[in-house]
Image (cartoon, rainbow, N blue to C red):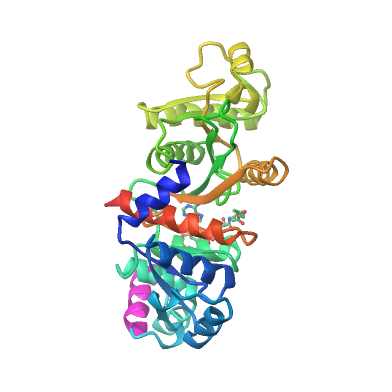
Amino acid sequence: MKLLEQIRENAKKQGKTIVLPEGTEERTLQAADQVLAEGIAKIILLGKPEDIHALAEKHGLKNINKATIIDPENHPKKEEYADLLVEIRKNKGMTKEQALKLVVDPLYLGTLMIKNGDADGEVAGARNATGDVLRPALQIVKTLPGISVVSGAFLLLTNKPEYGENGLIVCADCAVLPNPTAEELAQIAVATAGTARAIAKIEPRVAMLSFSTKGSAKNEIVDKVIKATELAKQMAPDVMIDGEMQADAALVPSVGNSKAPGSPVAGKANVLIFPSLEVGNISYKLVQRIAGIEAVGPVLQGMAAPINDLSRGCSVSDIVNLIAITVNQAAARK
Ligand code: ACO
């Protein structure tokens, strides 16, 4: 069975509840209908019920009546969530008045539902920019214990078995942290190895990417990757991590052998760690668009509960896949 089918099939066994704050976004609604039809998750849609029903009728979406629909303006737990928000953000000066305004924002409401145990995960971003999806998540749900950095991984389904793990490559950070320090880059590497194990079900071989392989170029941004490699190895001695290396040394056996002989990763990397968000975001979009590679994600890593952000250019099937991944992440936490 192909990876995405496995992820969807596994999700069906979990009975998890996913909140979709963009309940009146058309692709999101179509994806919700498919998720409900296939039993991938229970769905909470946030939005005006009359708008959701009108859109469902327009698109002939027969399963939307199985979703729980919540109007953020008239939410029965508005007061309770406002109190929860004040409690979480009081050291940042949050007042009850400010909290009452924020809880009607679907992106805040979705994360508060998760924090309160009313939903297991969230998927948003078909309509909203990444920063707007992530900010409430980072402020309310926050990071896992012992982790300070949230980052975003993509599963690249290359269909080229000579690369990665039979064509599958997991890469990060493509979505969140613009300019990580060496320590943060090391955390991203370890978290991505975890995603490779938990979601892609592969044993990670992690390449820390740069424009230099094993000292071939000297620059402070290369030094950052060298330091991050050392730190990541210390943080996760059970994971195969090596660097710094160029992308061809990481992926092509002959180049890996000649540029980094003896490396446990070079030439056979299945996890690629980019030195900055600029590199990661541009790289995944280039291979997705020019090479036609399926890029699934971003899968957010390091968050205390699974919240995933879509690209605004996403398709209905991208949303269904990300909901299934979110269910798998929620199941892996328990
Ligand atoms: N990991 C963990 N916590 C973080 C992170 C992170 N990577 N970044 C910020 N935070 C925390 C902060 O500590 C802060 O917590 P606090 O309020 O409790 O003290 C909170 O999140 C808010 O942080 P700010 O710095 O005030 O928020 P900012 O406006 O910088 O937003 C954000 C953070 C949204 C992640 C920002 O860095 C961002 O916009 N990143 C780029 C996202 C993006 O546009 N990606 C490209 C598109 S994605 C795609 O194409 C698939």
295 over 103 or under it: above or below: above
9 over 183 or under it: above or below: below
Horizontal relation, residue 202 to residue 210: left or right: left
Residue 80 visible in the picture: yes
Main SS, magenta region, reads helix
Residue at position x 62%, y 11% in the image: 258
Residue at position x 45%, y 86% in the image: 73
Q: Quadrant of the N terminus?
A: top left
Q: Nearer the viewer, residue 108 or 9?
A: 9
Indicate the position of residue 26 as horizontal and vertical percent values. 58, 72
Residue with the most extreme left position: 334
Q: Is residue 90 magenta?
A: yes
134 over 182 or under it: above or below: below
Residue with the most extreme right position: 290
Q: Quadrant of residue 71?
A: bottom left
Q: Is residue 295 magenta?
A: no
Which residue range is magenta in the image? 77-91
Residue 329 visible in the picture: no
Indicate the position of residue 186 as horizontal and vertical percent values. 47, 36
Q: Quadrant of residue 67?
A: bottom left
Q: Quadrant of residue 172?
A: top right
254 over 296 or under it: above or below: above
Horizontal relation, residue 284 to residue 44: left or right: right
Indicate the position of residue 48 as horizontal and vertical percent values. 49, 85
Q: Nearer the viewer, residue 255 or 101?
A: 255
Residue at position x 42%, y 83% in the image: 100
Indicate the position of residue 176 as horizontal and vertical percent values. 55, 52
Q: Nearer the viewer, residue 240 or 62?
A: 62
